[in-house]
Image (cartoon, rainbow, N blue to C red):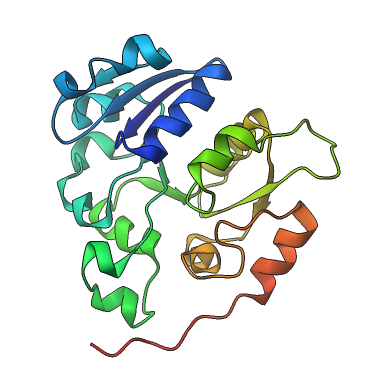
Amino acid sequence: MKIGIIGAGFVGRAVAKQAIKAGHQVMLSNSRGPQTLFSLKPMIGCETGTATEAAIFGEIVIIAVPLTAIGQLPVAELAGKAVIDAVNYYPERDGQVAELDQQTTTTSEYLAGFLPQSKITKAFNAIQMTDLETDGLPAGDPERRALPLAGDDKATKQIIISLYDAFGFDAVDAGALSEGWRFQRAMPSYCVRMTKAELEGGLAQARRPAPVAN
């Protein structure tokens, strides 16, 4: 499968490494242009390009940029695409976003407002990237870590479940895209090592915090 990744920071690079190990083709991109990524091709075996080129390249496209950068995404090229949202909201980095502070939307639904014709699924946001590279275990191992996902498109979800499995993780489907808040930052299961049963419980126990006054 061809995977385009927009964002070449810790998240983009870690997912790229694991995807290439699993036999997929990957193109990494960032806002500064492929010339700033020239060392990655020999280092991890990926292609490099602009965000637009990565969007065109990928059968699926992973968004791994700061929340403040989502307004710069190539909307037309991502239309109709399976898009994986790995974005997290950190007010101290991203500034205050009223809709997110007031709990009237989720990070993925917020992203969907910028990409109305894309098939967005929340995934790969609730694990430290060092753990993504080291915590994978074979299927059936009782200690195998589980990772959550949420979205409305069944086909995209199945792709993510297959990627999780190839990377060494079980998957827990949290439901519709609107349920993605259950594993956003500060939720009980966010970046916490859990088995499938533990993660199912953590997602069920999640409670939205009180809205932040702006």
Q: Residue at x 23, y 22 (%)?
A: 37
Q: Is residue 135 above or below residue 151?
A: above
Residue 103 location in percent, x, y?
Answer: 39, 79
Where does residue 176 sit, x and y in percent of width and height? Answer: 54, 61
Q: Say which of 188 and 164 sits in front.
A: 188
**Residue 122 appears at what percent x and percent y?**
47, 52
Residue 61, x across and y down, in percent? 37, 34
Q: In this view, does 177 lie to the left or right of 188?
A: left
Quarter occupied by residue 131: top right
Seen from the viewer's position, the closer of residues 102 and 198 is 198
The reply, left or right, for residue 49 in relation to residue 143 is: left
Q: Which residue lies furthest to the top in this view?
A: 42
- Relative to residue 39, is residue 135 depicted above or below? below
**Quarter in which the C terminus is drawn:** bottom left
Please tell me which residue lies in front, 145 or 172.
Answer: 145
- Does any portion of residue 209 appear in the rendered image? yes
Q: Quadrant location of residue 112? A: bottom left
